[in-house]
Amino acid sequence: MPFELSLRYSTPLTPINDVEEVLREFLRLVGYLPEGEDGRGSEGPIEKSLAYRLVRDCFLRDPSRAWYVEELTAVLKTSKPTVYRHINKLKSLDLLEEVGGVADGKGRKGYRLRYGNLARAWDFTEANAQNALRRYRETVNHLQELVEKMGTAPLPTPAPTATPKISPAPRAARAASR
């Protein structure tokens, strides 16, 4: 699964003491929740959305607990595909880890916040973001070297696309018919 994180310049949310507001804004900033000026998503208020409730009511309420998809579908009153879609979004942020279900004897996968702690999980996310930015930097440096090697030679221009030409006879006939 690819690592995916939205980066936006934002002031820290530390002056806000309402956990619901901080969580909602944080999840929007990192790209997990959709943008919305009115605090609403496609399902109504963000606080009632499945994506938000999954994080707040399950993974943050009991961060070290391994949640099985069947449990999540029951708690959130939704389908397995919907739960998996949201789990995959959280996994792409590297906030969740898979936990083997050896204890239940069924070998099911459970999911929990990485290291059972949001701050420690974010350390992992942050390290992945730094690695991604470092790779972008390497590509930018390589591109700059290639541009400098080209010297003053212009960048290659794309080949012109063929445009349909209208023959003079039909054009003259159209003009005469007006």
Image (cartoon, grey):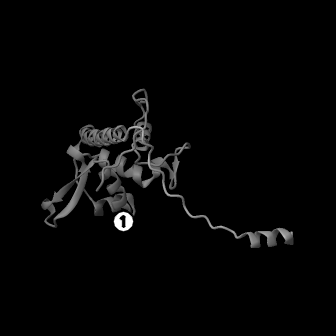
Q: Which residue is mark 1?
A: 81
Tell which of 42 and 172 is nearer to you: 172
Tell which of 92 and 52 is nearer to you: 92
Q: Residue furthest top?
A: 15
Q: Give left or right: position of 129 versus 173.
A: left
Residue 62: give x, y in percent of width and height: 27, 46
**Disc 1 on helix, strand or loop?**
helix
- How crowded is the residue under tag 1: few (<14 C-alpha within 10 Å), some, or many (20+)? few
Tell me the amino acid under the disc marked 1: Pro
**Residue drawn at 16 percent across, 65 percent down:** 107
Q: Quadrant of the C terminus?
A: bottom right
**Residue drawn at 15 percent across, 63 percent down:** 104
Q: Give left or right: position of 99 versus 166.
A: left
Count of marks placed on residues:
1
Q: Quadrant of the N terminus?
A: bottom left
Residue 79: give x, y in percent of width and height: 38, 65
Residue 130: give x, y in percent of width and height: 28, 38
**Residue drawn at 36 percent across, 60 percent down:** 85
Q: Give left or right: position of 108 versus 167.
A: left
**Residue drawn at 50 percent across, 55 percent down:** 43
Occupied quadrant, residue 150 = top left
Q: Give left or right: position of 33 versus 75.
A: right
Q: Is residue 101 above or below residue 151?
A: below
Occupied quadrant, residue 137 = top left
Q: Is residue 40 above or below residue 79?
A: above
